[in-house]
Every structure is written in C-alpha cells, then in structure tokens.
C-alpha cells in the first residue's frame, strides 16, 4: 500500500501529496440521513475528479471517526491508519 501511495520512482517519503477531504461531517448532533452524507461525498468526489484532470493527483485522503468508516468504505475508501481518535482512509483516483 505504501509503495502504491508513494508513486513511481520514490523509495521513501515523509509525506505524500494528495487531496484532503476535510470537515465534511463536522456537526455530531445531526443524523447522517439529515445531512444526506452520501450525496455530499459523491459531490465532493466529483469535484476532486474534475480537479485531477487539471492538476493531477493519485488519491484522496479523509480523516474520520469510527462511526463513519463504514460509510466511506462504501464509497471505495480504504482504511490505512488510525491516529488518536481519527481513522485515515484513502481513495485512489483512477
């Protein structure tokens, strides 16, 4: 997984450039249905894919709490790490 994230010709990297999807589900008091999370995620992915055509990029990263991991995995995100209370998931943009 790390080799795929680093990209071609890179043998090590402290950081890897990527798109970051942040603050999408900030309000813990609202239900996921009320927020229409699936629609928000699809909308955000569409914009990232459009940006990829102009500036490139290989993957999209999101940090989320445990309750949202299943939702993002349904959108082809892969869990790669957990730091503190947040899980890190990525989606390869192919």
Image (cartoon, rainbow, N blue to C red):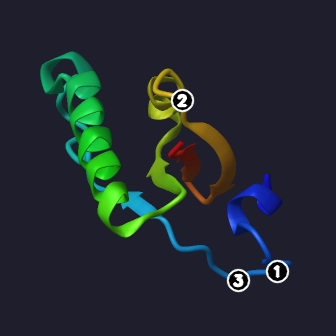
Q: Secondary structure at mark 2?
A: loop
Q: What residue is disc 3 on? A: 14
Q: CA distance from mark 2 to mark 3?
A: 25 Å
Q: Residue at x 47, y 53 (%)?
A: 60
Q: Secondary structure at mark 1?
A: loop
Which of the two labelled residues, at mark 2 and mark 1, occupies the earlier sequence position? 1
Residue 26, given in percent of the width and then of the height, sits at 24, 48
The disc label shown at residue 12, or none: 1
Counting other residues with Cα less than 10 Å from the Cα at mark 3, is it few (<14), some (14-19), or many (20 or more)? few
Q: Is residue 2 left or right of residue 17?
A: right
Residue 83, given in percent of the width and then of the height, sits at 63, 60
Q: Residue furthest right?
A: 11
Q: Residue furthest top?
A: 33
Can residue 25 be seen in this snapshot? no
Q: What residue is disc 2 on? A: 76
Counting other residues with Cα less than 10 Å from the Cα at mark 1, is it few (<14), some (14-19), or many (20 or more)? few
Q: Residue at x 53, y 36 (%)?
A: 66
| Quarter placement of the C terminus | top right
Q: Are marks 1 and 3 in contact (CB under 8 Å)?
A: yes
């Amino acid at each position: 997984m790390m080799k795929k994230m680093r990209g071609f010709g890179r043998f090590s990297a402290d950081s890897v450039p990527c798109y970051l999807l942040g603050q999408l589900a900030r309000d813990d008091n609202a239900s996921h249905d009320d927020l229409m999370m699936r629609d928000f995620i699809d909308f955000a992915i569409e914009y990232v894919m459009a940006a990829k055509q102009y500036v490139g990029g290989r993957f999209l990263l999101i940090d989320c709490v445990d309750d949202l991991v299943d939702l993002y995995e349904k959108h082809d995100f892969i869990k790669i790490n957990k730091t503190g209370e947040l899980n890190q998931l990525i989606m390869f943009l192919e």
